[in-house]
Image (tube, rainbow, N blue to C red):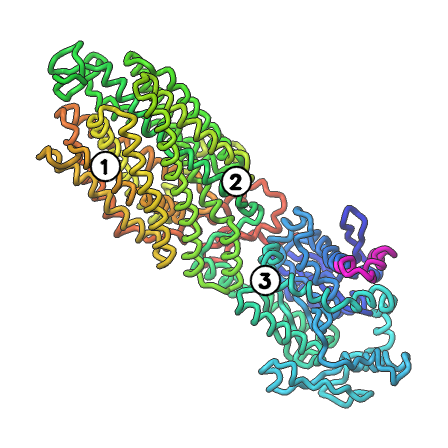
Amino acid sequence: MPAATVNDGTLRFSYEDSGPLDGTYTTFVMVHGTGFHSGIFAPLLPFAAANRVRLILINRRDYPGSTPLSDSELAALGSPHLETRAKALAQQGIDIGLFLACQRGGIVIVAWSLAHTPLAGFLAHADALPADALRTLEPCLRAYCIFDAPHVSFGLPTLSKYHPLVDSTYPMEQRVPRFYSWVSTYYHHSDTVRRTRNPALLDTTPLPYPAPPCARPATLDVIPPASLEAVSWPGPIQGSEALLHGMPLSLAFEQTRRMLFDREAGRVLPRCKVVIIWGENTLWEMAGAAWTVEKLYKEHKAAGQVGRSLEVVEMPGANHFPHWDEPEAMIRFLTSYFDFWNPIWFWFHHVAWDTFKVVAPPNYDEPIVTRRELWSYYLYYNGDNGVGPLGYSLTLFQSLATAAGYDPVRGPGSSCQDAGASGKCVLPWGSGTKAVSSVVLVANGASFAVMTMIFTTIGSAADYGTFGRWLLFVVTLICWAAQFASMSLTSPSRWGLAMALYMIGFISYGATLVFYAANFPRLARNTQHSRDLRERYDRGEISVEVYEREESLEKNRISNISTTHSNIGYIVTLALNLSLLLPLQSNPKVNNYVIVFTNGYWVLTGIWWFIYQQPRPGPKLPKGESYLTIGWKQIWVALKQYKKLPHTFIYLFAFFLLADGLNTTGTLVSICQNDKFTFSFLENTYLGLAQAITSTASTLGFWYIQRYWKISTKKMFVVTNVVTILIPLWGMIGIWTNKLGFHNVWEFWAYNVVFGLFQAPYYAFSQTMMAELSPPGFDNMFFGLFGLSNRASSMIGPNVIQAIINKSGNNWDGFPFLFALCSSASLVIWFTVDVPKGRRAAVRWAAEQRGKAYGPYSDAKDKESLWIYVPVSLTFSARDLGVVALTM
């Protein structure tokens, strides 16, 4: 017999192998019970190939050809210390797990009779297996089948104390034949008993010997003595088997608990279901054990306390030895139940399942998000709140530009800020002049153009390897450097340098937001709650609708909490800045100090993310590809297939226009605000505090409302989005009157309060919408496109608005265009984007793309196990199903 060595060659398992087949097939690893070696399954071998089955008949330790248990191992199994015995018992199953990891293909392990006692530790303690063994088993192991196991194997008290082998009324030489007859008889259980599956109704009366005539004789009563001797191995019965089956019930039940009811244990090899099969005519001991476990499982499931899927099945006409009496029938029964390659079975479980219940497959190689990691993620956004690069830097740049400019009405050399100024201000620009407001808008437009190049060129590349992690780190350092360099901006003549530093800081700040946000879908998928949800869904405990709603709420939780932290950081930063602005308000460098101080706060809170972020690398960059070109290639591929992602691309396009209008509206209001408050950092700090406080309260408030009433992300987005349209509409009023429309101090206070109440949660919900519509595993690519739509979209608005303002000299003339832009984009999102349909299309598209990675150009070596990608067609070809035939 061939043998497999495991555990660095220290253990040897002998086995009989019917051999691999061409095409697709299922591998059944059969494990014998007590007193019989693997030869008890030999009658199955002639029927394997015809039924597309590969049989591996393994000999457990202490049986022929396999490594015997050492004296120390036997001592541990019989130790008076329960903890020592428990570890030794678990190790028996772990050893079998190591053997299974040497196999390939779709595997079902079948533990017959008392074999379940040592094998239970395999699933109960699968977390003790080496990582490489788990990676091998995860895509291959389909089920753990417990065939006709007794109560003691599960750690349950038996229904009767009677057992022929311990019946002291007979000498030992008479007990063995009585046992053979007792265990292999064809029992008849009434229809009522079988229908109710009530163990209490089973007849446990000892059979007379010889057994009375039944429909057919007891298997071991009629087996030829030579055949019985050929498959028997009684040696371990008084050694290791006596120790295994003499285990305290509490230890055996602990294995049952971990295998079926422990959610933590169930997270390891979660695709492996447990199936208990009992024979219609088996001994009451085996049938009662199956029914008792089934009842326990239902009770635990009702209480939400299960860790793995369980099915309990009856095999018609079977006693305890169907593999000997009816080998062909047993093979057909097993293949009919575990027929992974049957087209109807495959269609239901892999096509229909993923068509109607499209959810992203979990990646169990990615670590669970820790509390420390999540808090470091929040703290990064706490510091990356935009006060410096988005607020103070713009104010300082506009202030220096205005001080360096002149009033075009009074001519060069005049001041734009003295009492006689006309309200207009221009700077030398090329061969002519340009309004300061237009210069600011040009800087913004150019910045957005650079962001576009960044997001399209290297955004998708961040999905590969660890590039995304380092990309966020680099752009963060650049932003920090630009902010610290603001200390050099001390005179109006440096307005050009101020413009450059503002653009560098603004571009890198925008990049940090995009690549920071790209982390959150992956974090949301790997929280403990999300993993639990997925496992409940896989076990059929919750519907796809419940799963999608709860997963969406988990994404919203992280998005809203991170947004709240950003707002809290905004408040803290502004409040701390008052400690400089108030006592040093007459110091000409106070604004520079404030920017440096603000940036220092971000460094202090942001550095922890780079320390505590756990590695979740993407796939390796394909051979022949470059980080500088793969982004454009992937975007081109995605754009060519936009019909497969209609809702994702409609949202991206509409949000491009909406974000363009909103971002430009914010810039235009800031220009008006800076003019009204004469570029005062102190006044802007007060206004920022008003916005930050309301933003924090509203983000938490909207999240509470959504969580309490289970409102969808899109509905929350629409409610907050309405205000987006009202802001430029209000600004339009200022064209015709100076009494309203951002002409008064109170209006800027009201704007900052309203912006905080609605726009902060709007940003959170828009981000979650993108996460819902992004194909899993392509987060950086689609968040890069989202960044293009959000941060880099304002290439149109600023250029159109600066042309309008440069021509009219009136800042308020830009609001009508922005109102039209925001309104039209919002209507498209409200009435055409279907988030549930978009989410499912995204999962299908991601599965297609990742599946192609293992096509003809794959570098994958182990093609036998590459079956996991979601099929998207009813055509059963390997290309459409994304399945590689399990040929070994």
x, y percent for residue 185: 75, 82
Q: Secondary structure beneath disc 3?
A: loop
Q: Residue at x 24, y 45 (%)?
A: 723
Amino acid found under the numbered disc labelled 3: Arg
Res. 686 visible in picture: yes
Q: Seen in the image, is 721 located left or right of residue 356?
A: left
x, y percent for residue 679: 25, 24
In the picture, the disc for residue 618 is 2
Q: To which residue does mark 3 refer?
A: 308
In the picture, the disc for residue 749 is 1
Residue furthest left as drawn? 736
Q: Nearer the viewer, mark 2 or mark 1?
A: 1
Q: Residue at x 23, y 37 (%)?
A: 749
Residue furthest top as drawn? 413
Q: Which comes before the other along the chain, label 2 or label 3? A: 3
Q: CA distance from mark 3 to mark 1?
A: 56 Å
Res. 15 visible in picture: no
Does 629 appear in magenta? no
Q: Secondary structure beneath disc 2?
A: loop
Q: Which residues are magenta?
A: 66-86
Q: Residue at x 52, y 43 (%)?
A: 853
- Report the front residue among 572 and 709: 572
